[in-house]
Amino acid sequence: MIHGEHYGGWTRVFKAAGVPHVGTYGICHRATTDIANSGVPAKVDMMLTGHKTVAMFMHYVRTEDKLVRDAAELVASRRLAITGASCSMEATA
């Protein structure tokens, strides 16, 4: 399929659905990120997406702020449980 035909068809689908245009590249990133965050092993994720290398799979995975915050809170709470001391997550100048 020629790029113009592909793009035009995709644009018509979004317009007919009344949703903002999102390219196939963005959809691949969203789907791969959702698969990566699903909790199944990376090897299974890669089978679902068709990626042959971890590097290419990770290229399509986007880090999501909520997951980073949740991970930081989990680490902080575990540290507090082990040491009894809290740790500030803010950088010091």
Image (cartoon, rainbow, N blue to C red):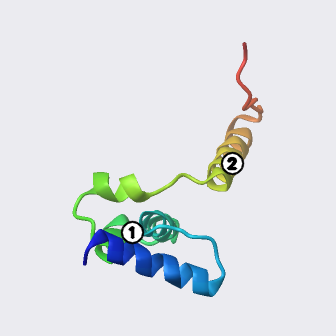
Q: Amino acid at mark 1?
A: Pro
Residue 27's spot in the image, x, y percent?
Answer: 48, 69
Residue 67's spot in the image, x, y percent?
Answer: 63, 55
Residue named by callout 2: 69
Label 1, residues with CA under 10 Å away: few <14, some 14-19, many ≥20: few
Label 2, residues with CA under 10 Å away: few <14, some 14-19, many ≥20: few
Residue plotted at (52% across, 69% down): 34
Q: Are marks 1 and 2 in contact (CB under 8 Å)?
A: no
Numbered label attached to residue 83:
none
- Quadrant of res 24: bottom left
Q: How many marks?
A: 2
The single residue placed furthest to the top in the displayed view is: 93
Residue named by callout 1: 41
Nearer to the camera, 62 or 81? 62
Circle nearer the viewer, 1 or 2: 2
Residue 73's spot in the image, x, y percent?
Answer: 71, 47
For numbered disc 1, what is the local secondary structure? loop
Q: CA distance from mark 1 to mark 2?
A: 22 Å
